[in-house]
C-alpha cells in the first residue's frame, strides 16, 4: 500500500460535504434499504414463483442462490470499483442496474430468465451497503458517527425482519411479481436523490488508469461463488456425500488461497488486505461474522418453527417476528447517542449479553406456548442488536484512514453476509441431522413394553373406534403417536439450537474487549 494512499493530505482529510449530512443519509439509505429488503422479501414468494414458472420448489431456490452469489462477489471489490469509476457514478450505476434488474425479474417468463436477472440484481445491489456505510461515516463528524451508524443499522437490521411479512402480504394480495416491481419507483427516487446530494471526497482512492487486477478478481469470484453454492445447497445435497459438493469445496479452498497470495503481491490489488493489520478492523470483522450467524440463523429458524410445528400461516408467522424491528429501532437510537459517552466495548458486551438472554428465552419454547412467548424474546433480540451493531461498526472503522473506508466497509459487509450463510447452513443441517437422532431416542421409549404408552394407546384407540371402527382406530392411534414423536423430536432440536446460540453470544461478550479504545472526538480521524 503506497504512502500516498495511506497518508493523504491534511486538507483532504478535513474535507466536509456542504450538504446537510441527514439529507445525504436519507439519499443513500433509500437504496440500501431497498437492497437489504430484497434479500429476504422474495423468500416467502418462492412457492408462488415455482408454480408460476413450472418449476419445483428446489429449483426455485436458485432464485435466492444466484442473488447471493453475485452479491458476495461484488461486496469486497466495492472499494476498488468505486475508485476506478468514481464512487458517486458507481453508486448511481449500481442503483440503475438493481432497479432495471428488478423490473426484469418481475416480468420474467421462465426460471432460467429470473435466475439470470436475479444474478444481475445481486451484482447491482452488492455495492450499495458498503458504499452507503462509507458515505455516512465520512459525512458525519466522528462524534456523531454512532448516530450515523444507528441510521444505517435501522436499514440493515430492520429490513430483513419486515421483508418476509411484506413479501407475504404482497404475494397474497397481489402477485409475486410485485415483490420485484415495488423496487422500481423507489430506485428512481433514490437515483434522483443521489445525483443531487452525494459528492465524491477528494481523498477517495483513485484507481482510474491503473491496471485492473483481472486475476485477483477472477479467483475472488470463483472462491465466493463456489463457497456460497456449497453453503446454500450442502444440506439439500447431503454435503460431502455428493461428488459435486466435494469438488466445489476443493475449488473454493484452492481459489481462496491463490486469491490471498495474489492480493498480497499485486501492486494494485482489487481488495487491499492490508486493512487487517489494524487490530480493531480484524477483531471487528470476526465479531460481525458472529453477529451475522446469530442474526440470520434466528431469522431463518423462527418462521420454520412457527409454520411447521405451530401451524402458523406464512403471513402470521411474519407478524409474530416483526416486533423484533421495534426493539431494533429503539436500541439503535439509544446506542447511537451513547457512543462516545460510554466505552464502545462496554456497549458491545452489554449487547451480546442481552442477545444471549433473548436466545435463552427462545430455548424455553414448547408446543403449547402463546404468541407472546415468541414476540417478547423477539423484541429483546432486536433491542440487543442496536447495542452491538452501532458501537461495533464505529470501533471497527474508527481507526481506518478515510481513504480506506470503501475497502474496509466492503470486506466488513461481506463478512456479515458470509456469517449469515454459515449460520443458516449449520442451523438447517443440525435441524435435519439432530431431529433424526432425537426421534430415535424417543421411539426407544414408545414400545409395547411401556405401560404408560400401552395405556394411552389403547385409551386413544377406544375413543377413535366409536367413529372409525376398531381396525382403523388402531392405525389412526399409531399415526397420531408417531406424529407427536416427530413434533417433539423437532422441538428438542430447536431448543438445542437456541442453546448453542446462547453460548455463542456469551462467548462474544469478552471478545469485545480485544478492541483498542476509539476516541470519538470532533476532529477527523487521522490517516495511518
Image (cartoon, rainbow, N blue to C red):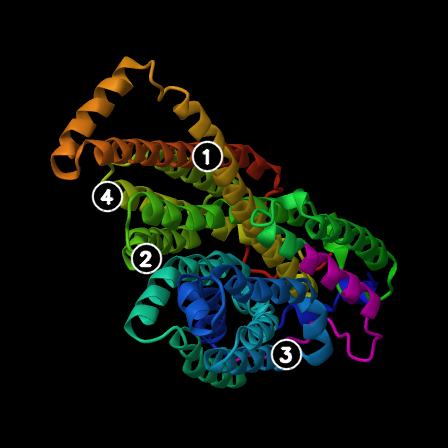
The residue pinned by badge 2 equals 314
Q: Secondary structure at mark 2?
A: helix
Q: CA distance from mark 3 to mark 2?
A: 37 Å
Q: Which mark is first along the chain, 4 or 2?
A: 2
Label 2: how many Cα within 10 Å (few below 14, some 14–19, many 20+): some
Q: CA distance from mark 4 to mark 3?
A: 45 Å
Q: Which mark is first along the chain, 3 or 4?
A: 3
Q: Find residue 19 and report its horizontal and vertical position in percent.
A: 50, 79
Q: CA distance from mark 3 to mark 1?
A: 47 Å
Q: CA distance from mark 2 to mark 4?
A: 17 Å
Q: Secondary structure at mark 4?
A: helix
The residue pinned by badge 1 equals 435
Mark in the foreground, 2 or 4: 2
In the figure, is residue 501 to the left or right of 476? right
The residue pinned by badge 4 equals 372
Mark in the foreground, 3 or 2: 2
Q: CA distance from mark 1 to mark 4?
A: 26 Å
User: Going 40% across and 68% down the picture, which residue do you hit?
Assistant: 48
The residue pinned by badge 3 equals 90
Circles 3, 2 touching at the beta carbon (< 8 Å)? no
Circles 1, 2 touching at the beta carbon (< 8 Å)? no
Mark in the foreground, 1 or 2: 1
Magenta-colored span: 197-226
User: Going 25% across and 32% down the picture, which residue do you hit?
Assistant: 477
Amino acid at each position: 500500500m503506497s504512502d500516498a494512499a495511506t497518508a493523504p493530505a491534511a486538507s483532504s482529510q478535513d474535507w466536509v460535504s456542504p450538504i446537510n449530512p441527514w439529507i445525504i443519509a436519507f439519499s443513500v439509505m433509500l437504496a440500501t434499504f431497498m437492497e437489504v429488503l430484497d434479500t429476504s422479501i422474495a423468500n416467502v414468494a418462492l412457492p408462488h414463483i415455482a408454480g408460476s414458472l413450472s418449476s419445483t420448489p428446489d429449483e426455485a431456490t436458485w432464485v435466492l442462490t444466484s442473488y447471493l452469489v453475485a452479491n458476495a462477489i461484488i461486496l469486497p471489490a466495492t472499494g476498488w470499483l468505486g475508485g476506478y469509476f468514481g464512487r458517486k457514478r458507481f453508486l448511481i450505476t449500481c442503483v440503475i442496474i438493481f432497479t432495471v434488474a428488478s423490473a426484469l425479474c418481475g416480468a420474467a417468463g421462465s426460471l432460467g430468465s429470473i435466475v439470470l436477472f436475479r444474478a444481475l440484481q445481486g451484482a447491482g445491489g452488492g455495492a450499495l451497503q458498503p458504499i452507503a456505510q462509507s458515505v455516512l461515516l465520512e459525512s458525519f463528524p466522528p462524534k456523531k458517527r454512532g448516530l450515523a451508524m444507528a441510521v444505517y443499522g435501522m436499514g440493515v437490521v430492520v429490513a430483513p425482519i419486515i421483508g418476509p411479512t411484506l413479501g407475504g402480504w404482497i404475494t397474497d394480495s397481489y402477485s409475486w411479481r410485485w415483490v420485484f416491481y415495488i423496487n422500481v419507483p423507489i430506485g428512481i427516487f433514490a437515483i434522483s436523490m443521489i445525483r443531487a446530494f452525494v459528492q465524491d471526497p477528494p481523498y477517495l482512492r483513485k484507481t482510474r488508469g491503473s491496471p485492473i487486477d483481472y486475476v485477483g478478481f477472477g479467483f475472488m469470484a470463483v472462491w465466493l461463488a463456489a463457497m456460497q453454492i456449497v453453503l446454500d445447497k450442502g444440506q439439500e445435497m447431503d454435503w460431502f456425500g455428493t461428488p459435486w459438493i466435494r469438488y466445489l469445496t476443493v475449488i473454493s479452498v484452492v481459489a481462496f488461497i491463490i486469491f490471498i497470495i495474489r492480493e498480497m503481491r499485486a501492486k494494485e490489488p482489487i481488495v487491499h488486505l492490508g486493512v487487517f493489520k489494524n487490530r480493531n478492523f480484524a477483531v471487528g470483522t470476526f465479531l460481525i461474522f458472529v453477529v451475522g450467524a446469530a442474526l440470520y440463523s434466528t431469522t431463518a429458524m423462527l418462521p420454520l418453527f412457527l409454520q411447521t410445528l405451530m401451524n402458523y400461516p406464512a403471513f402470521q408467522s411474519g407478524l409474530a417476528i416483526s416486533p423484533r424491528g421495534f426493539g431494533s429501532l429503539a436500541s439503535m437510537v439509544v446506542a447511537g447517542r451513547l457512543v462516545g459517552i460510554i466505552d464502545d466495548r462496554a456497549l458491545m458486551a452489554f449487547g451480546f449479553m442481552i442477545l444471549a438472554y433473548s436466545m435463552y428465552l427462545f430455548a424455553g419454547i414448547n408446543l403449547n406456548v402463546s404468541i407472546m412467548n415468541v414476540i417478547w424474546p423477539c423484541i429483546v433480540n432486536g433491542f440487543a442488536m442496536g447495542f452491538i451493531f452501532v458501537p461495533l461498526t464505529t470501533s471497527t472503522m474508527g481507526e481506518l484512514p478515510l481513504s480506506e473506508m470503501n475497502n474496509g466497509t466492503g470486506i466488513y459487509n461481506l463478512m456479515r453476509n458470509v456469517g449469515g450463510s454459515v449460520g443458516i447452513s449449520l442451523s438447517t443441517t443440525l435441524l435435519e441431522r439432530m431431529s433424526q437422532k432425537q426421534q430415535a431416542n424417543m421411539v426407544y421409549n414408545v414400545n409395547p413394553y411401556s405401560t404408560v404408552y400401552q395405556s394411552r394407546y389403547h385409551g386413544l384407540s377406544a375413543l377413535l373406534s366409536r367413529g372409525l371402527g376398531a381396525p382403523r382406530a388402531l392405525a389412526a392411534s399409531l399415526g397420531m403417536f408417531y406424529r407427536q414423536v416427530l413434533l417433539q423430536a423437532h422441538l428438542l432440536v430447536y431448543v438445542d439450537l437456541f442453546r448453542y446460540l446462547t453460548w455463542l453470544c456469551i462467548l462474544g461478550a469478552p471478545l469485545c474487549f480485544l478492541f483498542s479504545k476509539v476516541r470519538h472526538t470532533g476532529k477527523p480521524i487521522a490517516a495511518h
